[in-house]
Image: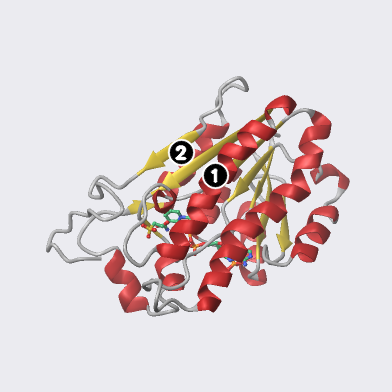
C-alpha cells in the first residue's frame, strides 16, 4: 500500500476527483468534509480500491479540527501528504456592497481552516522529519479581479502561507507546494451564487473550463515526484482563460 494522503474538501469537486484518482493509484486516504452522506458514499465507492477512513468536521471550528485529527486510529496517524483543498467563494460583490457574513466564511474557511488543519498535522510531520503539504490556492491569489476582493484576499493569504510554510518547514525535510487553478467546473459557482444553479452554469458556458480531474492529475504528478523534487508553485488555466479577467467565450458573454 502507498503513502497516506489527508484531503480536506473531499466530498466534492477537486477534492473528490483527487480522492478517486489517488484511490486507484493505491494511496491510503483520509477523506474529510462536512457532508456525512457524501463521506459514506466515498467510503462505499473507494473502499474496494484502497484503505480509507473518513473524518467529518468543519474546518472553521478549531476544536472539531483538532479532535477529528486526534481521533485517527494508530494505523492512519502517519500522514505523508496533506492536501489543503477545502474552500469556496461566497458571493461576488463590490467591497462596498459585500456581505460581512460572506467575508467571515471565506476568511474562516479558506485561511483559518487551512491553518488549523495544518497546525494539527505539522507536528507529526516534524517528528518524522518527513511530509508533504499541498495547498490549493487559486489564480485569484495571484491577480485580483473586480468584485473578487475578499475571496482574492483569502487566496493571496494561501499563497503567502504556502511560501511561509516552505521557509519555516525547510529544516524538517517537509515538502510544500501550491497549485493555483483558474476556472474549474465544480460546485464552486453554486456555492458562490448561493444555490443559483442557472447563474452558476453561466460561469462555465461558452468555453471549456478545467475539470476537477485535470487538477487531480496535476496533484498526483506533484506528489509522485522523487522526494528531492519540490514543485513550489503551479498555476493552471483553461486554454480559453488568459487571466482572471480575460476569458474567451464563443458568444463573448462576460462571466
Ligand atoms: P466545491 O464546492 O466543489 O468543493 C468544496 C469542498 O470544500 C467541498 O468538499 C466542501 O465539503 C469543502 N468545504 C467547504 N467548506 C467547508 C468547511 N467549512 N469545512 C470543511 N469542508 C468544507 O469546490 P472546488 O472543488 O472547486 O474547490 C476546492 C478548492 O479549489 C477550494 O479551495 C477553491 O477555492 C479552489 N479553487 C477552485 C476553483 C474553481 O474554479 N472551482 C479555481 C481555483 C481554486 P462540505 O461541503 O461537505 O464540507
Ligand atoms: C476560483 C477561480 O476565477 O472564480 O478560485 O476566482 S475564480
State the residue lying farthest toward the left. Answer: 251
- Could you say where residue 177 lies in the image, as x and y percent from the top left? 55, 36
Q: Is residue 2 visible?
A: no
- Could you say where residue 8 lies in the image, as x and y percent from the top left? 63, 55
- Badge number at residue 160: 1
Q: Which residue is mark 2?
A: 218
Q: Residue at x 43, y 73 (%)?
A: 91
Left or right of 187 on screen, residue 73: right
Left or right of 152 on screen, residue 244: left
Rendered-image quarter of ligand 2: bottom left
Q: Earlier in the sequence, mark 1 or mark 2?
A: 1
- Secondary structure, mark 1, is helix
Q: Is residue 86 visible?
A: yes
Q: Residue at x 35, y 71 (%)?
A: 200
- Could you say where residue 159 lies in the image, as x and y percent from the top left? 51, 45
Quadrant in the picture for the C terminus: bottom left
Q: Nearer the viewer, mark 1 or mark 2?
A: 1
Residue situated in front as seen by the camera: 185 or 180: 180
Quadrant in the picture for the N terminus: top right
Q: Could you classify mark 1 by the number of other residues whose Cα lies within 10 Å: few (under 14), some (14-19), or many (20 or more)?
A: some
Q: Quadrant of residue 75?
A: top right
Image vertical order of residue 48 relative to residue 228, above or below: below
- Badge number at residue 13: none
Q: CA distance from mark 1 to mark 2?
A: 21 Å
Left or right of 221 on screen, residue 64: right
Amino acid at each position: 500500500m502507498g503513502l497516506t494522503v489527508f484531503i480536506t474538501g473531499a466530498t466534492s469537486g477537486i477534492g473528490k476527483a483527487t480522492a478517486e484518482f489517488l484511490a486507484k493509484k493505491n494511496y491510503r486516504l483520509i477523506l474529510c468534509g462536512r457532508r456525512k452522506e457524501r463521506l459514506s458514499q466515498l467510503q462505499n465507492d473507494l473502499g474496494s480500491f484502497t484503505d480509507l477512513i473518513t473524518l467529518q468536521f468543519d474546518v472553521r471550528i478549531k476544536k472539531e479540527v483538532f479532535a477529528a485529527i486526534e481521533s485517527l486510529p494508530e494505523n492512519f496517524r502517519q500522514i505523508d501528504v496533506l492536501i489543503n483543498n477545502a474552500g469556496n467563494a461566497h458571493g461576488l460583490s463590490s467591497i462596498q456592497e459585500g456581505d460581512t457574513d460572506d467575508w467571515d466564511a471565506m476568511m474562516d474557511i479558506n485561511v483559518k481552516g487551512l491553518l488549523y488543519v495544518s497546525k494539527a498535522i505539522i507536528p507529526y510531520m516534524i517528528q518524522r522529519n518527513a511530509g508533504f503539504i499541498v495547498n490549493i490556492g487559486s489564480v485569484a491569489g495571484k491577480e485580483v479581479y473586480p468584485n473578487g476582493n475578499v475571496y482574492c484576499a483569502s487566496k493571496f493569504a494561501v499563497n503567502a502561507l504556502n511560501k511561509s510554510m516552505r521557509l519555516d518547514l525547510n529544516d524538517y525535510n517537509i515538502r510544500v507546494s501550491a497549485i493555483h487553478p483558474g476556472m474549474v467546473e465544480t460546485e464552486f459557482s453554486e456555492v458562490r451564487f448561493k444555490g443559483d444553479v442557472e447563474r452558476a452554469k453561466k460561469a462555465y458556458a461558452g468555453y471549456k473550463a478545467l475539470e476537477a480531474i485535470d487538477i487531480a492529475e496535476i496533484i498526483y504528478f506533484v506528489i509522485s515526484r522523487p522526494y528531492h523534487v519540490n514543485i513550489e508553485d503551479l498555476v493552471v488555466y483553461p486554454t480559453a482563460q488568459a487571466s482572471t479577467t480575460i476569458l474567451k467565450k464563443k458568444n463573448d458573454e462576460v462571466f
